[in-house]
Image (tube, helix red, strand yellow):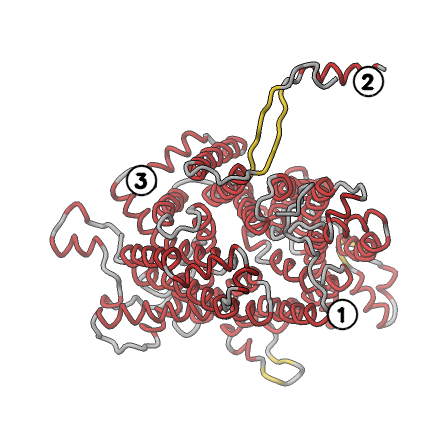
């Protein structure tokens, strides 16, 4: 008797009913970007709470991060430089994700791309003293080929043998690091250091600081932004047209959305799986090549703070749209730059993870609608 | 005697993978993808080590590590079960969170190596003073307590899955949630439970690294892809604990043999060790566990196709009542 009374009282107190129902209509166009922004805000709030919990001051941390990333033109140039490999990796992941192929191997493909570009200089494939017009295209091409190879392997295994590509791409990431280390510590080691000798000037991508020196522009002095940004932008634009405007892009999207329909439409899924993985790998390889030639200037270890993995988040944040990867990558480039300034250094990585969690959580509202209806206090009795 | 030493450390190394793999099996049997093992493991290893260092009691660390991973598991379950989001992406996201939080919380832990109390090692001194056989047994049985817990867990997991009522419910919600629901099994509640249980087991795997078997905290290298190897093992195991356990111990053996190949000047009593002469070649040895995971996946995929054994039928599909999973 007593128990019942309590329940009744509770019912009287609660005048609203929450109802979750699936959306039958298309969600309005403004909803998706709004949810993305909301997810970002919530992610930074949660990360802030976590920072406070470990004894930091979130407001101070964030303002320092912002200053470090975008506070000056100099910092902005650094953030843009970091955005270059991120754009490539983001586009690479977007392409594969459109077909629901989970290429988590952009990191390994990046390393192999860096290896491929270095091979041109250090093997050497191009004779010493060649001009930049020979060096740069060969390096980029070689990086793409090696990246493509690293994408082809899991693509082939998935298409022909049904091997889960998430695991295979991830395992190849670890193999790629060991592969590069072999050359780093052995064959290409320079005077026993874990790096190669510095590349000749002709093998380096043009930097803003080079322009500053040549034309004596004070404002650009010491800025590290390099020609790779143009490559990255062009790649993103081309891939936008490939994915959204070409027949092949349509095949990929259809296969991702509805593999059965794609099969009945006569699309060669096996071939496309391999092609998509190889192309995705080639783009990520280009990231490695441009990073080696534009930033690192030699073959070296630890050239990536996880560009390939961040590419996954970037692809998701840009809703798999290659053009959107550009602003998103600049934002994440800033996050990486900011990470160098703050302690503990894991904070940017943590923020990245929380952003991805919030993003996929907020996508809930794209597919479902929550209805709050008022119920009268006694209606239930 | 050296062979027994190798076998002993194979058992220990395999135990880490065993916990993560069992966690994966339980979660995925319920129909929820578990790609977050690496993140759970690293968080478990970090929190376990940190708390063990702060309290001086490794058992408290063990509990804390398991709990931390379980909390992360709640998040995964919430995203996959309640929000019905893509389980692959959720798994990846949880990995990022687990790694990131571990990096932040573990900032100064690498200074503590050697100063933290570890979980006890069990020995049988009675074996130590006898014949060669008992000497071998002594070496083989000198193991961390977690190794024994792991060994006990295999038959228990198998029995639970295939011989008990709750185990049957677990398999049912992964194979045919509609039918299970109509029989009165609450699908989503159980999916929460097993996602969290899977996370806790992976967390145990993490603790078994940092506070027991390979003591210490070395940022991301603490786990160094072991969680991902577990994900591969789950697929290889065909979601069966015993098959998976054999895989896990074999991996333990493999990584120990690799370690042994690096050091001596000559191998098998006469052949010059190429890895001693040229230490750079050891980088190829380091690739072996990862390449082997690939091979294991290929074998697993082939066999699954031949025998028509697949993943749990509802794996990756969220369940809502009154409609087929979307």
Q: Position of residue A25 (x, y in %)?
A: 51, 39
Q: Which residue does the image show at 63% across and 61% down from the upper left?
A: B232
Q: Splitting the image into 4 quarters, where does residue A171 fall?
A: bottom right
Above/below status of A58 relative to A354: above
Q: Nearer the viewer, residue A60 or A112?
A: A112
Crowding near the residue tagged with mark 3, few <14, some 14–19, many ≥20 C-alpha atoms within 10 Å: many
Crowding near the residue tagged with mark 2, few <14, some 14–19, many ≥20 C-alpha atoms within 10 Å: few
Element at badge 3? helix
Numbered label attached to residue B20: none
How much space separates mark 1 and mark 2, taking CA atoms? 64 Å
Q: Position of residue A88 (x, y in %)?
A: 37, 57
Query: Which numbered mark, 3 or 2, is in the foreground of this view?
Result: 2
Question: Mark 2 — residue?
Answer: A3
Total tally of numbered discs in the picture: 3
How much space separates mark 3 and mark 1, taking CA atoms? 59 Å
Query: Which numbered mark, 3 or 1, is in the foreground of this view?
Result: 3
Numbered label attached to residue B4: 1
Task: Answer with mark 3 or mark 2, whichever residue precedes in sequence.
Answer: 2
Question: Mark 3 — residue?
Answer: A70
Above/below status of B42 relative to B293: above
Q: Which residue does the image show at 31% across and 40% down from the upper left?
A: A70
The chain that hosts pointer 1 is B
Residue B30 lies left or right of residue A158; in this view the side is right
From the image, which quarter does the N terminus of chain B lie in?
bottom right
Q: Nearer the viewer, residue B121 or A277?
A: A277
Q: Residue furthest left?
A: A215
The chain that hosts pointer 3 is A
Marks 3 & 1 on one chain: no
Q: Position of residue B60 (x, y in %)?
A: 71, 40
Q: Position of residue B285 (x, y in %)?
A: 57, 71
How much space separates mark 3 and mark 2, taking CA atoms? 60 Å
Marks 1 & 2 on one chain: no
């Amino acid at each position: 008797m007593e128990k019942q009374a309590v329940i009744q009282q509770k019912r009287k107190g609660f005048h609203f009913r929450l109802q979750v129902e699936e959306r039958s209509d298309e969600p309005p166009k403004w909803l998706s970007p709004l949810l993305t922004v909301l997810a970002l805000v919530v992610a930074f709030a949660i990360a802030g709470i976590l920072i406070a919990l470990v004894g930091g001051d979130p407001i101070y941390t964030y303002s320092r991060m912002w200053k470090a990333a975008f506070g000056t033109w100099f910092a902005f140039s650094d953030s843009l430089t970091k955005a270059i490999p991120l754009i490539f990796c983001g586009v690479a992941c977007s392409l594969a994700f459109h077909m629901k192929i989970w290429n988590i191997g952009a990191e390994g493909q990046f390393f192999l791309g860096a290896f491929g570009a270095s091979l041109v200089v250090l093997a050497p494939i191009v004779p010493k003293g060649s001009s930049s017009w020979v060096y740069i295209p060969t390096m980029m091409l070689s990086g793409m080929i090696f990246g493509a190879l690293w994408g082809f392997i899991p693509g082939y295994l998935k298409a022909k043998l049904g091997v889960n590509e998430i695991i295979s791409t991830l395992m190849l990431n670890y193999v790629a690091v060991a592969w590069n280390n072999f050359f780093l510590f052995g064959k290409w080691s320079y005077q026993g250091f874990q790096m190669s000798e510095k590349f000749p000037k002709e093998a380096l991508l043009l930097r803003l600081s080079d322009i500053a020196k040549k034309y004596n522009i004070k404002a650009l002095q010491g800025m590290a932004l390099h020609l790779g940004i143009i490559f990255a932008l062009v790649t993103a634009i081309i891939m936008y047209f490939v994915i959204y405007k070409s027949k092949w892009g349509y095949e990929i999207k259809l296969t991702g959305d509805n593999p059965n329909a794609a099969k009945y439409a006569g699309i060669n899924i096996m071939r496309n799986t391999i092609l998509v993985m190889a192309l995705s790998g080639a783009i990520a390889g280009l990231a490695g090549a441009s990073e080696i030639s534009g930033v690192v200037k030699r073959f070296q270890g630890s050239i990536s703070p996880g560009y390939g993995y961040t590419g996954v988040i970037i692809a998701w944040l840009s809703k798999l749209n290659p053009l959107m990867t550009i602003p998103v990558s600049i934002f994440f480039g800033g996050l990486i730059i900011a990470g160098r300034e703050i302690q503990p250094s894991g904070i940017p990585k943590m923020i990245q993870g929380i952003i991805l969690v919030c993003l996929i959580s907020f996508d809930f509202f794209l597919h479902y609608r929550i209805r709050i209806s008022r119920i009268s206090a006694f209606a239930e009795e | 005697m050296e062979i027994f030493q190798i076998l002993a450390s194979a058992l220990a190394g395999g135990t880490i993978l065993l916990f993560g793999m069992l966690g994966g099996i339980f979660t995925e049997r319920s129909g929820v993808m578990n790609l977050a093992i690496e993140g759970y493991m690293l968080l478990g290893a970090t929190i376990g080590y940190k708390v063990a260092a702060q309290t001086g009691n490794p058992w408290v660390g063990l509990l804390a590590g398991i709990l931390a991973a379980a909390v992360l598991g709640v998040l995964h379950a919430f995203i996959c079960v309640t929000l019905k989001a893509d389980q692959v992406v959720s798994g990846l996201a949880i990995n990022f969170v687990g790694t990131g939080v571990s990096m932040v919380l573990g900032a100064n832990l690498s200074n503590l190596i050697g100063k933290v109390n570890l979980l006890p090692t069990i020995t049988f001194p009675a074996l130590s003073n006898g014949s060669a056989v008992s000497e071998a047994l002594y070496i083989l049985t000198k193991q961390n307590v977690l190794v024994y817990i792991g060994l006990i867990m295999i038959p228990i997991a198998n029995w639970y899955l295939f011989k008990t009522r709750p185990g049957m419910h677990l398999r049912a919600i992964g194979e045919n949630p509609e039918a299970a629901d109509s029989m009165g099994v609450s699908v989503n509640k159980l999916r929460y439970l097993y996602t969290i249980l899977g996370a806790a087991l992976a967390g145990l795997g993490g603790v078994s690294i940092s506070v027991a078997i390979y003591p210490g905290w070395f940022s991301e290298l603490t786990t160094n892809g072991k969680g991902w190897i577990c994900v591969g093992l789950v697929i290889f195991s065909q979601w069966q604990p015993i098959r998976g356990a054999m895989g896990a111990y074999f991996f333990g053996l493999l990584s120990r043999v690799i370690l042994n190949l690096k050091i001596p000047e000559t191998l098998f009593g006469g052949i010059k060790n190429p890895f001693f002469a040229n230490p750079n070649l050891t980088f190829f040895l380091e690739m072996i566990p990862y390449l082997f995971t690939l091979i294991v996946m290929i074998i697993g995929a082939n066999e699954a196709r031949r025998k028509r054994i697949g993943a749990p039928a509802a794996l990756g599909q969220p369940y809502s009542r009154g409609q087929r999973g979307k």
